Amino acid sequence: DTAVSQTPKYLVTQMGNDKSIKCEQNLGHDTMYWYKQDSKKFLKIMFSYNNKELIINETVPNRFSPKSPDKAHLNLHINSLELGDSAVYFCASSQEVGWDYGYTFGSGTRLTVV
Amino acid sequence: RKEVEQDPGPFNVPEGATVAFNCTYSNSASQSFFWYRQDCRKEPKLLMSVYSSGNEDGRFTAQLNRASQYISLLIRDSKLSDSATYLCVVNRYKLSFGAGTTVTVRA
């Protein structure tokens, strides 16, 4: 059973398009996250939701809009895609906010904007 | 200043060698600390938590120095399968990652 699953795994799209990435966790965790890993391999948090409520919103362009319909799902919608959005996007979850025992990550969505 | 600064490597070591590297963190209020491992084109996976008293997990030893805001990882008797990028991670309401240390173990 996959603990944190993301779809799609790969996404190639043209500049200006709108796309969504979906994430689901079956661990019963309360908190979910989106991280972005750029070409320099640096992982940076974008958003965090706890029980469907947004609790972390880092400095991210407002073209990125997360949505959490329930605590097991966290989706990421990106409008007007730009070349610089090309990266790997990882979803993660943890038991609760500030959980001291680490997060579980999904396998990532590799987004390429052409 | 980045929240987590990490020795980037790369470290290229023969099988059986010992390799050690470290990182520093800027937020003294950080509450928990980890080493994650990331293989090429894969997600990060928790390797071990790091405690002030130092802790071991098999061939891996991690150390935390809160006074100096310094975390280290030592790998003994390196295996080919240890080749990966090791991410230093600190937690204060969110995980903040270092840029990673690349380790390559050669036969």
Image (cartoon, coloured by chain):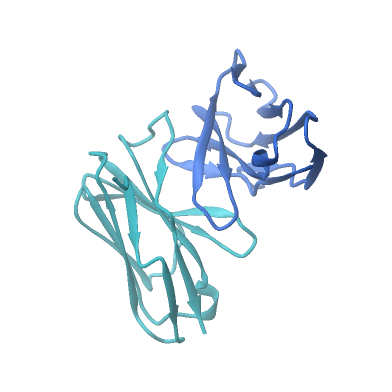
In the image, residue A84 lies at what x, y percent?
Answer: 54, 75
Q: Is residue A103 above or below residue A87?
A: above
Residue sitting at the far left: A70
In terms of image quadrants, where is residue B87?
A: top right
Q: Between residue B57 and residue B36, name the one nearer to us.
A: B57
Q: Residue at x 34, y 80 (%)?
A: A18
Q: Is residue B21 visible?
A: yes
Q: Quadrant of residue B66?
A: top right
Please state, as top left, top right, bottom left or bottom right, where the C terminus of chain B lies in the image: top right
Q: Which chain is cyan?
A: A
Position of residue B61 in the picture relative to residue A101 (left or right)? right
Q: Is residue B61 in view?
A: no
Give whichever of A84, A105 is nearer the camera.
Answer: A105
Asked if residue B89 is positioned above or below residue A7 in the image, the reply reads above
| Image spot of residue B62 (x, y percent) | 64, 24
In the figure, residue B20 lies in which quadrant? Answer: top right
Name, please, the residue furthest toward the front.
B107
**In x, y percent, where is residue A72?**
22, 49
Any idea which chain is the blue one in this picture? B
Vertical side of B23 occupied by A68: above or below: below
Question: Residue B91, position in %: x, y?
Answer: 49, 35
Q: Residue at x 36, y 68 (%)?
A: A8
Identified at 24% across, 44% down, the residue is: A26
Label count reads 0
